[in-house]
Image (cartoon, grey):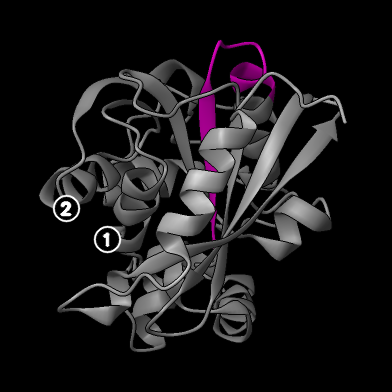
Amino acid sequence: MDWPMGLPPEIVGHLLEENRTHRCPGDPDTCVRITGIAELPSRFGDFQIVAFRNVGDAKDHAAIVHGNPFEQERVPVRLHSECLTGDALGSLRCDCREQLISSLERIGQCEAGVVLYLRQEGRGIGFANKIRAYQLQDQGFDTVEANEALGFRPDEREYGFAAHMLGSLHVRSIEIMTNNPAKIEDLRRHGVRIEGRIPIVMAPQAHDQAYLETKRRKLGHLLDVEQIDPAAAPTNGVDR
């Protein structure tokens, strides 16, 4: 078979063997191991997809790899948390789908890069609770208030296992594609060397305008002020 330009067969074999019986001493919640690697040709470019299994909670995560980031530095990396409503269904309540597509397009044009697709739906509260939060937002809560009303922190995600995924791919340092300073701080706390930040700001539209403003104002996301109009509101007057 003609292997695409990416992780070469000998490195694929090395990673699979290295992870075959891998278990971390200590906290199992951040321990992941590679369980499979396959080609993933897509409309965004030629990728390979790496399946990871979390040893602690048995959740599956994915690394979508372009080129060969093995032992490379300053690798462009996007951490993308799962969003069924946005990624798969095209919901306009958030900009998740647009961020995912933009990340894949941009990384598909790089020499090497990685998108980590993380199973942390609804900023870590899970799909069912996310829909409950949407229901509260329909009643006038903003995205932070809705999470707190359900007994959660505004953002329940953590990125220790994402740092482990990058380590398992032998990525030495990254340029992170994010607007979220908390993500940078958490990755650094888990030992990831971050050489720079690549903004990934999507133009707002009527249904997510106030949602994006809440992320900027209450969660500290680094969104370009010119692209967010604090006075704007979605068509039904509710912050999604």
In reply to whether residue 112 is colored magenta, the answer given is: yes
Nearest to the observer: residue 216 or residue 234: 216
Callout 1 secondary element: helix
Q: Judge from the rendering whether residue 188 lies leftward or rightward of residue 125; answer left or right.
A: left
Quadrant showing the C terminus: bottom right
Residue 120, above or below 100: below
Spatial distance from mark 1 to mark 2, Cα to Cα?
A: 6 Å
Nearest to the observer: residue 189 or residue 202: 189
For image coordinates 44% across by 65% down, the residue present is 33
Q: Earlier in the sequence, mark 1 or mark 2?
A: 1
Characterize the local packing of mark 2: few (<14), some (14-19) or many (20 or more) Cα atoms within 10 angstroms.
some
Q: Judge from the rendering whether residue 25 lies leftward or rightward of residue 21; answer left or right.
A: left
Answer with the quarter of the image where residue 151 lies. bottom left
Residue 165, above or below 72: below
User: What residue type is disc 1 on?
Assistant: Gly
Instruction: Name the residue carrying label 1.
Output: 160
Q: Judge from the rendering whether residue 117 lies leftward or rightward of residue 14; answer left or right.
A: right
Instruction: Name the residue carrying label 2.
Output: 190
Percent position of residue 180, x then y: 33, 40
Characterize the local packing of mark 1: few (<14), some (14-19) or many (20 or more) Cα atoms within 10 angstroms.
many
Nearest to the observer: residue 159 or residue 173: 173
Answer whether residue 154 is visible to the viewer in this image. yes
Say if mark 1 contacts mark 2, CB within 8 Å. yes
User: What residue type is disc 2 on?
Assistant: His
Answer whether residue 210 is visible to the viewer in this image. no
Which residues lie in the magenta part? 105-118
Percent position of residue 175, x then y: 34, 22
Q: Judge from the rendering whether residue 185 lies leftward or rightward of residue 203; answer left or right.
A: left
Residue 197, above or below 125: above
Quadrant showing the N terminus: top right
